[in-house]
Structures are given as C-alpha cells and as structure tokens.
Amino acid sequence: MIDRRTFLAAAAAAGAAAGAEAADEKLAVAGGMPVRRQPLKTKNWGPEFYDDKERQQLDDVVEMRNPFRFANPEDRSKVAAFEREYAAYAHTKYALAVTSGTAALHCAMAALEVGPGDEVILPAWTWYSCYNTVIQAGALPVFAEIDESFNIDPADIEHRITPQTKVIMAVSLQGNPADMDRILPVARKHGLKVLEDFSQSVGAKYKGRPLGSMGDIGISSLQQSKTITAGEGGAVVTNDARLYERAFRFHDVGMLRGADGKRNFFPGLNYRMNEFTGGVLLTQLRKLDTIAGAVRANAGRVYGGIRDLPGVRLRKLPDPEGELGTGIFIGFRTSGERQRYAEAMRAENVPVSSPGGSVVLPVVPEIENKVTVAPGWPSFQTERGKAIRYGRECCPRTIDILSRFAGVMMDPKFTERDTADAVAAIRKVYPAI
Ligand SMILES: Cc1ncc(COP(=O)(O)O)c(C=O)c1O
C-alpha cells in the first residue's frame, strides 16, 4: 500500500500517462487546483463505435427496398442474422429481436404466462419497464430489497414468495451481473421461473456464463444508453422452445410465420424489428467484445488504482471478472459523507453519479439530501394474509444503500490519462471525507 503523497508524487513523475493534470493536495472544493481542467464526461458507448460498417448496412436496406423483416427470406434478413448471432453470443438456442427492452419484457411476460392473480418478485431498484410490464400483464409486482451490488438481494427473496408467485426477475444493473448462483436455487426450490433482465449489462458475464443463458428466459434492451445500440431495440433469449414460440407469437400479432400456425388466436401485439435496426445491431454486436473489453480495461485501471485506499468500500461484485465496469461506485457511512464526496469530486472535474435506476428515486441527493420514493401505490393486505408493500416502506435498505453510494462512470473511449485522473481524484478526495 502506498500513501496519497507517494502516489501523487509518482503520478506527477509519470506525467501525462499517470494523468494527474494538476495534482494538488488542497481539494479544489476548498480552493485548490482541480485534478482536471475539463470535466470527465461519458458518451453513449455504441454510437461512439459507429463507422462505415453501420452505414453500409443502412445503404443495403435502402438498396433492397424491403425494410419489413418478413418480406425478406430468412437467409437475407438482417434481423434474422442478428438473431442467429445474438443467440450464439448468449449461448441460447433462440433469440428474438424486438423493438425495445420494454417490448422484450412484455413478450417475456406473455411467454411465461404471467397474468391476473400472479405475483412477480423483482428488485425495488430497477427500471420502470420491469414493473410496468408486470402490471400490463395483469399481475402484481412484489419488490425485494437490493444489496450493495445494487441488484436484488438473494437473501430477501424467499420470504416474499406466496402461492401466487410465478416469476423472479433477476435484473443485472449497471454492468454488474445479478448473483444467479444464489437466486436460481431459491427459484428451483419453489418451482418458480426466472427472468433475467440484462439490459444494462450486455457484454457482462457471470462466472464465465453469458447473461440471459442461466434463467428460463432473458431479455435485453438495445436502446441508446446500452452497450450496443441502434437507438432503440431489444431482444428475448431462451433455450425453451415453448417460451420462444409464445414470445414470437406475442411479438407478431399472434402469428408464427413460416410455420403452420400462421392463423391462430394467440393475442399478440406488434413488436417486430425492422431491417434498418437489424442491420445496425448486427454490426454493433460484432463490435460488442471490443466495446465491453475497452470499458472493462478502463474500469480495471481505476479499480487497480484505488483498491488499496484504507477503508474503501466498493460496490459488491459477485463476479469481478465478468462485471462490465460501468461505474466505479464507492459506498460511504452516511448520505452526508456521500454528498461531500460528490461535491468535492465535481470540483476536481471528475463528477460522480448516483446509482442509475428508477423505482426509488434519489432526487439530486448531493443538493437536497433527500430521497423521494416512487411509485406511490397503496400497500395492501392480500386475501391470503401477506402484505404487499409499495413506496418507502417496501425497501428501507434499498433507499439507505442508494443514498450512500456514488460512482465515477466509465467510457470505452477513455484515455489512460482519463482513468488516471479518475484515480487521482478519488485518491485525493476520498481520504479527506
Ligand atoms: C434494466 C432495464 N430493463 C428494461 C429497460 C427497457 O428498455 P427500453 O428502454 O429499450 O424499452 C431498461 C431501459 O433502460 C432497463 O434499464
């Protein structure tokens, strides 16, 4: 372990590669020289890698004048090619391309036959679409606490199971895989299905296994803020032929094109992906390892540079090797400490963010130091005696964790200097908090 003074001296000696542009012992928030002159900023990862290959795909579709996926034979369709390669990436038998992650979740609900009377257990901290699609299916979302991974706490699932529970939703937030080795046994013990939502962790792995391949069905968003993107897009993956058929029919107004069941009474919607989107996603998918590898390498440099800080409490990672490294999150004892850290880091021009999600909304805690909770649905007693709780009372631990963590967000295009600046700022500010 080296102390901060030694580190700063070494960083200065190493010059640009070491990063610390203007390392100064005095915090910038107290009038010292900031670590960087310009704020460290991230962009949308996928579009940073757009080049002639994506452009060529779009040109092809214009030339072919058949942007409707099913107007193309299977071996010419770009959407079908994307599905084949996405299934291979996810190590699943099937992949279904759809218009968004929300659409993919809706298809998964239909595939799993989630309906009125059913309950779905999901983390209290996740994206709106996760619980909205449960409600759209006519079922009830039941929130479980998260732990310091920001994902569902596997130890908080079992006591929420009732005879109505049908599905556990394992969401892998901000690049960090949900702890499937602890979630799957609970599900199997109670005969429940597992839906993996790895929208925010496309390219991450869990103990060598691709996300989406471990539960009964997996979904991902391919919207602009995700690892790869065509602006919008989504996918469902599964090894189960019946779940695939139900998801497929649901995404195409109940039809199963190319098979006998074209006319049927399955009540599907229209979530079909078009060929422009399919072409761009196919190209982005072929760049996924490059993008994920670059983010991981950058995060690795920052982790490596701060791990020895005395007392540092990093976000819990069930598989540090497989994590993407979307953000370098540090936990504090109180929200007040976190607030001071955020203010000091912003002054160093290495700003930090709160964990990203939706159900529990920390409203700019660094300014207001307060947490607002949504949704404001009424909690109630079920007929069979179990209470279903929403709002603040469903997840006090989740609110506490979210109010104490803050992270420097990563980008695949960060330079060595950027990551060294992140290290220098954390090393400068953290011990002073
Ligand atoms: C975890 C998670 N699930 C689902 C979605 C929904 O995806 P989309 O925006 O493509 O509908 C998102 C989007 O951010 C998400 O983060």
Image: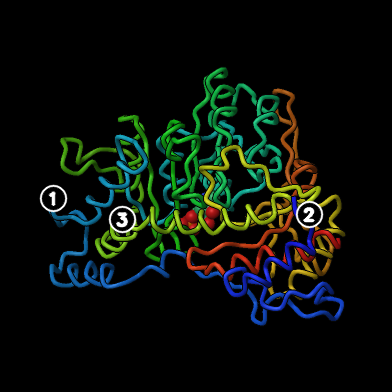
Neighbourhood count class around disc 3 (C-alpha, 10 Å): few under 14, some 14–19, many 20 upward: some
Whole-number angstrom distance, CA of label 1 to CA of label 3: 18 Å
Asked if residue 290 is positioned above or below residue 398 in the image, the reply reads below
Kindly identify which numbered label has been placed on residue 286: 3
Q: Which mark is residue 359?
A: none
Q: Give the amino acid at mark 2.
A: Ser
Q: Residue at x 20, y 36 (%)?
A: 261
Q: Nearer the viewer, residue 325 or 274?
A: 325
Mark 2 / mark 3, whichever is N-terminal: 3
Locate residue 48 relative to residue 14 in the image: left or right: left
Q: Disc 2, ligand 1: is the CB inside 8 Å?
A: no
Query: In the rendered structure, which disc, 2 or 1, sits on the residue that comes first in sequence?
Result: 1
Q: Quadrant of the C terminus?
A: bottom right
The residue pinned by badge 2 equals 403
- Which residue is at 69% across, 50% downward? 307
Q: Which residue is mark 1?
A: 75
Q: Secondary structure at mark 2?
A: helix
Q: Residues within 10 Å of mark 1 (few under 14, many from 20)?
A: few
What x and y, as percent, mark residue 349?
A: 70, 75
Task: Judge from the rendering whether residue 38 lies leftward or rightward of residue 34; answer left or right.
Answer: left
Q: CA distance from mark 2 to mark 1?
A: 50 Å
Q: Could you tell me which secondary element the residue under label 3 belongs to?
A: helix
2 vs 3, front mark: 3
Count of numbered marks: 3
- Residue kind at label 3, given as amino acid type: Arg
Residue type (three-letter) at the residue carrying disc 1: Asp
